[in-house]
Image (cartoon, helix red, strand yellow):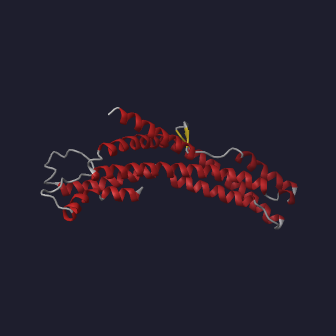
Amino acid sequence: MFSILALYLASPSIPSILDKLHPLNETRNRIFLYQTEYFVDQNEYYIPILIHAYITVPISLSILVFVDNMFAIHHLEKIHEISGKKTKNKKVRTKKILRQIILAVEMHSNVLEFSQELESSGALSYLIVLTINLSMITLCGIVTVMKLDQPSESIRFLAFTIGDIFHLFFSSFQGQKLIDESENVFHSAYMSKWYDIPVELQRLLVPIMARSATPCRVTAGSLYIISMDTFSVMLKNAVSFFTVLSSMR
């Protein structure tokens, strides 16, 4: 996302570069990061307006990126992964196996509680982010096509479209990893050498296997499960909306 942001922020310099590489009889029009009204002569105050845009655009993008809790989901994945590895007991002493299983049970209990809190606090924000992503992919795609006769503008909106797609992809990828790692806890316990440990230790694995049989998920407003399936559906819908709106031009 931030690499796409860098490309977007570099767009105002394109006219100056082209004026030096391929000069015309007149100076090319200046590019603004976004259209707004400051009630001043925008050509005269171009630099202050550009500086203001360079400050506000990264801040707004950072809020959009970090509000979707990708780091929290990544943290959940790794705890699931560690919990699964703890259940893969090897030929070690019974006391050590007991400590590993107890630790795995505690970690699994904590991660389930954490995932529930993440779901309750982030479901609405995820729904908002997905809605914004779908809208921006569609609208920026349309503007990209409409401005094909203006390469600098078209490239700028194309970069923004690609950035939205990548943001949606990484959010969906983290959600898919959470599902996969939570399922791996069940498989790790099932494939462990549980038959080589005492019966009382075998019983400790039952709660983990029972709960991990249903994978942890993060949803968008309890309507969409954040996963790669959701990514493909959202991208398909964005393309469909883009096609319909383009045909109405």
2 vs 228: above or below: below
- Residue 51 appears in which quarter of the rendering? bottom left
Q: Residue at x 54, y 42 (%)?
A: 230
Percent from the top left, x then y, of residue 238? Answer: 44, 40
Q: Residue at x 82, y 51 (%)?
A: 203
Q: Quadrant of the N terminus?
A: bottom left
Give the left or right position of residue 216, taking residue 86 as reference.
Answer: left
Q: Please name whichever residue, 3 or 86, is drawn nearer the observer in this view of the structure.
A: 3
52 vs 142: above or below: below
- Residue 110 seen: no
Q: Residue at x 64, y 51 (%)?
A: 180
Q: Residue at x 39, y 43 (%)?
A: 136
Q: Quadrant of the C terminus?
A: top left
Q: How many marks?
A: 0
**Name of the residue lying farthest toward the bottom:** 92
**Name of the residue lying farthest toward the top:** 248
Give the left or right position of residue 191, taking residue 38 as reference.
Answer: right
Percent from the top left, x then y, of residue 211? Answer: 71, 46
Give the left or right position of residue 140, taking residue 188 as reference.
Answer: left
Percent from the top left, x then y, of residue 47? Answer: 19, 58
Percent from the top left, x then y, of residue 99? Answer: 76, 62
- Residue 246 seen: yes
146 vs 81: above or below: above
Q: Please name whichever residue, 35 or 150, is drawn nearer the observer in this view of the structure.
A: 150
